[in-house]
């Protein structure tokens, strides 16, 4: 079984833009003569917002390659090596990296695969808290935002794969942190499970500017941006001098043909704001240090993580689309096989 | 004679929002018993875009205090000390700093006045190339943008008080630099006087995105932002990875009640852009170093500067309004008295 992109998408992506098809019996061996090649058995697949961009055809190449209609969708995943002609990968090893939405993937010249050093924690965590989203939260908050103790931090999409960790890193740093999310269930998680100082359901606020004034009477030092649009515009009005906006993603915009207009950018001048985008792929040399730190935090119960686990490849398209509708509660993972 | 704000302004500012009134005979002495006070004879006054913000009443205090209707307008100027009870200021000294739009100003506890160390260059230069605008160009380009040799630099409002210097600093750094301006006369100046590699009249471009693609087929590394609005939106589409946008001002927006919407901010994520605002007032400790460097460049003919000099306080309101219509060619200065 595998998941293909059926057609390029303009505007709102739906499940029917993907197709789940049966595969022929798969040879679990690297083809004769193929060097530096591995066969992976895929265990857990990660659904991430940036994948929406790959479903659209870009005239000018985007920052990630577009998917190709008729070809298998790819994304971050946790896999087991079942055959290898690559000196760095041994049969039986567990790895995480960019794999296919299928049961088995044949990968030549694997790039940016990390071996899983801590299989004693749930393997699915390598799609989340100790995988790309967790590392994104760490680099974005601890490196790009350069937080100081006591600062006021706002996180949007705060119950998501990245946001829930940003809030916990902020508390570990001694910051005051408020998160926004799209359901009361998520708001409860933020306050009672992840230890945010406060949280609100943005769908219940008629005026986001007033909501932010309520939670941040002194203003916002650090905004961890996951959503874009109206939230960003309201945040700009509520930033403090020398504030930082870490531009991680803008999920509210990904299904729009014409992105929303942002009107309050003059605040970047008036408040001396730094707004900065980043890719974790520029920081891979510090991944191992992050992995050790985070595994330690998990073992000491200093941080926690919620995953929204869907069973079976056939449910992967709906899980991915669910991200853009806010259906997931926590990190969206698809289980292909548990071992 | 003095220039007052007549009323707070909403939307487009006009000359009639200010009033030039006669003053009674002025006592050129510090009043008896007033300590730490100076009387200044104002020589050259600076017209700067940020002053538009001060003409509007802000519910939440802005980054610079609002003017007060019925009171004299204040701004950067070059003045001579004619009386002083302040130990740091002697009669006859020349200073630059925040003074009144009037012939003589009485200032208690003068803050952030700099003595003019190089009266051998034209004194008006202390409102421009070696004053606040020149220092702004230096800090914004050389510090905030952190340019590297060979990078591609775009400057908007490039013939203005700040822009003309940014382009020249970019050439001194070994960058490729293109400027935009609002008349063919200014475009000629950019190319033939300031040494920009290229320049264009934005009013003659029906599609700013295509214009930028033409001048920057490889994209833009550094954008020195003076205008905001449609230019910023087009620039965002043409930035290179790891680009920097120095947010100095957004003059196209200052007369608007509802600022333009900017649609391409996702590029900050996709291109890992840093967009950053700054105030020169945070950097005053390096002013003297800048002054020496720039005076040296002037004496060696390594940089040049164009001023648009208007005679007489009574013409100051029209000179200020002219900034927002692009009437000035180069730095807008008002002469009150030449000595």
Image: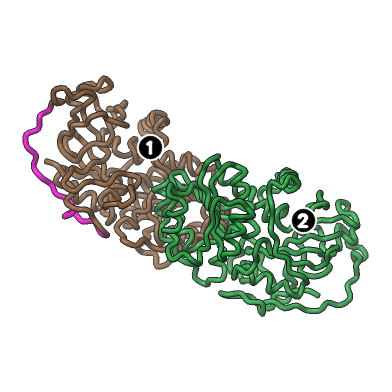
Chain colours: A brown, B green
Farthest-out residue, left: A25
Q: Which quadrant would residue B307 be assigned to in this image?
A: bottom right
Q: In the image, which disc is placed on residue A326? A: none
Q: Is residue B197 left or right of residue A329?
A: right
Predominant secondary structure, magenta span: loop
Q: Residues within 10 Å of mark 1 (few under 14, many from 20)?
A: few
Residue that mark 1 sits on: A281
- Which secondary structure lies at badge 1? helix
Q: Which quadrant would residue A332 be assigned to in this image?
A: top left
Q: Nearer the viewer, residue A326 or A19?
A: A19
Q: Nearer the viewer, residue A100 or A10?
A: A10
Residue that mark 2 sits on: B111
Q: Which quadrant would residue A92 be assigned to in this image?
A: top left
Parent chain of label 2: B
**B6 over A20 or under it: above or below:** below
Residue occupying the point 28% across, 21% down = A88
Question: Which is more foreground, mark 2 or mark 1?
Answer: 1
Q: Is residue B187 left or right of residue B230?
A: right
- Which secondary structure lies at badge 2? loop
Residue occupying the point 66% across, 68% down = B66
| Residue range corresponding to the magenta coloring | A11-28
Discs 2 and 1 lie in a common subunit: no
Residue occupying the point 64% across, 48% down = B138
**Magenta stretch containing residue A15, yes or no?**
yes
């Amino acid at each position: 079984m595998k998941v293909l992109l059926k057609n390029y998408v303009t505007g709102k992506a739906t499940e029917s833009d993907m197709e789940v098809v049966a595969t022929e019996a798969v040879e679990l061996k690297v083809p004769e003569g193929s060097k530096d090649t591995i066969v992976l058995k895929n265990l857990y697949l990660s659904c991430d917002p940036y994948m929406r961009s790959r479903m659209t055809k870009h005239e000018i190449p985007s920052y990630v390659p577009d998917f190709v209609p008729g070809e298998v969708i790819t994304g971050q995943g946790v896999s087991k090596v079942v055959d290898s002609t690559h000196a760095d990968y041994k049969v039986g090893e567990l790895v995480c990296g960019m794999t296919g939405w299928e049961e088995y993937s044949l990968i030549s010249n694997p790039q940016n695969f990390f071996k899983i050093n801590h299989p004693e924690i749930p393997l699915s965590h390598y799609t989340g808290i100790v995988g790309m989203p967790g590392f994104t939260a760490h680099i974005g908050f601890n490196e790009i935002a350069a937080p100081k103790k006591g600062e006021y931090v706002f996180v949007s999409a705060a119950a998501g794969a990245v946001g829930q960790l940003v809030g916990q890193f902020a508390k570990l740093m001694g910051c005051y942190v408020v998160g926004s999310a799209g359901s009361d269930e998520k708001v409860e998680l933020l306050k009672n499970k992840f230890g945010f100082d406060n949280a609100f359901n943005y769908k219940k606020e008629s005026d986001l500017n007033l909501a932010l004034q309520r939670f941040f009477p002194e203003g916002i030092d650090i905004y961890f941006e996951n959503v874009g649009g109206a939230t960003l515009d309201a945040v700009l009005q509520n930033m403090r001098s020398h504030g930082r906006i870490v531009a991680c993603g803008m999920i509210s915009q990904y299904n729009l043909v014409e992105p929303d207009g942002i009107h309050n950018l003059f605040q970047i001048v008036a408040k001396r704001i730094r707004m900065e985008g980043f890719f974790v792929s520029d920081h891979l040399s510090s991944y191992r240090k992050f992995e050790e730190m985070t595994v330690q935090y998990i073992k000491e119960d200093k941080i926690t993580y919620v995953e929204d686990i869907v069973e079976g490849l056939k449910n992967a398209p709906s899980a991915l689309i669910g991200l853009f509708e806010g259906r997931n509660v926590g990190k969206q993972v698809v289980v292909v096989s548990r071992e």
